[in-house]
Amino acid sequence: MKLKEISSEGKLYAFVCSLNEVKEGLEFLSDDSDFIQLGTWNYKKHFSTVPHYHLEHDKPSNLTQEVVLVHKGSVKCRLYTKEGKFVEEVDINEGELIVQIYGVHEYIMNKDSIVLEIKNGPYFGPEVDRKRIDIIDKPS
């Protein structure tokens, strides 16, 4: 279930979802055009999906996007433009996740936390795959 979408100047930066109240069946929370596809399953015992595999397609991905799932604890996520302008901050609590679509992100642990991070690859290392920036208007 989508809790919140975070946008700035018409561009989607992230969305926050909860796994605490998942609808029955299959529900996709991402748009078909997103590089990261996010769906929930809520099926009864003995339900079986139809056996299948995914066909190979060229799917260009020129931007790393990530999902951060808080298993235990609480994490504050601050979002900024690539120029370092503050967009918004949101707390991600147990059973919730954030899908990072665009822009700069910073995480602050509100509590001792166990977090699962999922992102598209391959990963080329910190020097090639990411850029640290100076924040213009960091919230206090």
Image (spheres, helix red, strand yellow):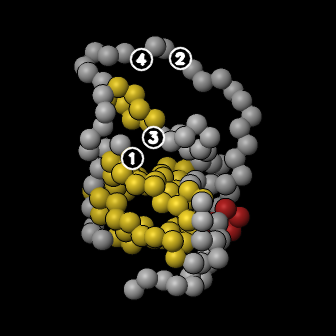
SS of the residue under disc 1: strand
SS of the residue under disc 3: loop
Cα gap from disc 3 to disc 1, whole angstroms: 7 Å
- Specify which label sits upstream in the sequence, 3 or 2: 3
SS of the residue under disc 2: loop
Q: Residue at x 64, y 71 (%)?
A: 82
Cα gap from disc 3 to disc 2, whole angstroms: 21 Å
- Specify which label sits upstream in the sequence, 3 or 4: 3
Which quadrant is home to the C terminus?
bottom left
Cα gap from disc 4 to disc 2, whole angstroms: 8 Å
Query: In the rendered structure, which amino acid carries the disc numbered 3?
Result: Leu
Residue 63 point in image, percent of width and height? 67, 54
Query: In the rendered structure, which amino acid carries the disc numbered 4?
Result: Thr
The circle drawn on residue 2 is 1
The circle drawn on residue 49 is 4
Q: Nearer the viewer, mark 2 or mark 1?
A: 1
Circle 2 residue: 52
> Counting other residues with Cα less than 10 Å from the Cα at mark 2, is it few (<14), some (14-19), or many (20 or more)?
few
Q: Determine contact: label 4, label 2, CB under 8 Å.
A: yes
- Specify which label sits upstream in the sequence, 4 or 1: 1
Query: In the rendered structure, which amino acid carries the disc numbered 1?
Result: Lys
The circle drawn on residue 29 is 3
The quarter of the displayed image where residue 77 is located: bottom left
Q: Determine contact: label 2, label 1, CB under 8 Å.
A: no
- Does any portion of residue 69 appear in the rendered image? no
Between 53 and 79, the residue placed more toward the observer is 79
